[in-house]
Structures are given as C-alpha cells and as structure tokens.
Amino acid sequence: ISTILNNLLNLASFNSASGAPPFSAVGLAAVTGSVIERTKMLAARKNIKVSTDKLSLTRVWGNHTALEEVVSNLLKNAIQYTPSGGEIILESRPDAKNRKGLLVVRDNGVGISPEDLLYIFEPFYRSDKSLHMYQQGTGLGLPLVREIVKRHGGSIDIESALDKGTKITILIPLAPSAKA
C-alpha cells in the first residue's frame, strides 16, 4: 500500500504546477550508478547481471531525485521481468543530433506484447501475462516514468518482443552548459 501511495503522490506532484521540483544540471552516469548500487541485491537474488555500456559524463537539465525515480522504476521492472540468469544493460550518452541526453535500459526478459505496448503507460494497467506470472507491482511505475520524462521536456520509446526482451530509450534535453 505504501508503494501505491508514494507513486500516486509522485504522480500528483508532477501534475501540479506548485509541486514541480527544481531543475539543475544532472549527470546521467551518477544517477544510473546510484540506482544500480541500490538495486544490486535485488538483481543478485535472481542471478541477473546488470552492467553498463557507454556511461558518459552526460549532463541533462532536470531534477536528480526525479531522474533517479525514472531509472529505478525502469531497472526494477527489468529485474522483475527478466528470468534468472538474464542480463540488463544500461547506457547513457549524449545524442548530439538532438542535443539531448540518451538513457537506454535493455533486458533479455519476457518482453511485452504489441497489444500491451499500447496501454503500458495507463495507470494501473497490467497485462494478463504479468498478472499471472508476476504478482508484484502496482501498475503505476511506467505512468510515473512517462510523466517525469514529459516534465523534463523529454521523450520515451519502447521496443519489445515477446521472449526476447525490451529496450527503453529516453531522451532528455542536455543541461545548458553541456556540449553534445
């Protein structure tokens, strides 16, 4: 219940103008590293390898705590839906073409069906497969991620194939002093 309440409060704060968190230059590698450190025991329990690829010193314009929430939700989902012995790779680097910071979370988990991809950002949505296979979760993590990314002026894209895995790509504007 506390997880549901915290997620609802976070969603509500991002939907109110007065609740908008302060922005500054945030290093994506630092955010990613701290989230990996906090979730390593969760991954270890399932014998899942979490690694990084191309973690650069990319600095985006945003809120550190909110961006940690994004990475945390995505990494916990990847761990939850990746079978024992699987692998998750996180990547962050500048995207010079778009002057944005790129964050990628890729796993070799169960994947998401094309039908479910249409609804995964809806609050409380859970696919039939996830309801039967995985009892944890509130259905609020991805809606929260989408709202945070949107409030950061960014975009989120998901590619997935059943039984092959999922790749989530997020683009967030670079910090004003950052050079792509």
Image: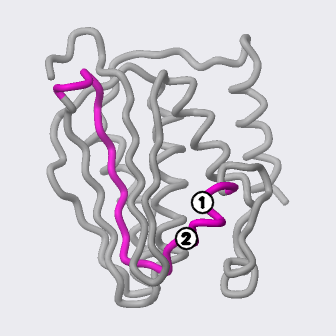
Relative to residue 69, is residue 78 depicted above or below? below
Nearest to N terminus: mark 2 or mark 1: 2
Query: Which residue type carries mark 2?
Result: Ile
- Secondary structure of the residue carrying tag 2 is loop
Q: Which mark is residue 117?
A: 1
- Secondary structure of the residue carrying tag 1 is helix
Question: What percent of the width, then of the height, locates residue 4?
Answer: 80, 54
Residue that label 2 marks: 112
Relative to residue 120, is residue 134 depicted above or below? below
Q: Quadrant of the C terminus?
A: top left
Question: What percent of the width, then of the height, locates residue 74?
Answer: 49, 56
Closer-to-camera residue (122/29): 122
Relative to residue 45, is residue 15 depicted above or below? above
Identify which residue is drawn at 47% across, 41% down.
156
Please state the extent of the stretch shown in magenta in the rendering. 96-119
3D distance between C-alphas at marks 2 and 1: 6 Å
Residue 62 painted magenta: no
Image marks 2 and 1: residues in contact by CB distance under 8 Å: yes
Q: Quadrant of the N terminus?
A: bottom right
Identify which residue is drawn at 29% across, 26% down.
100
Residue 1 falls left or right of residue 80? right
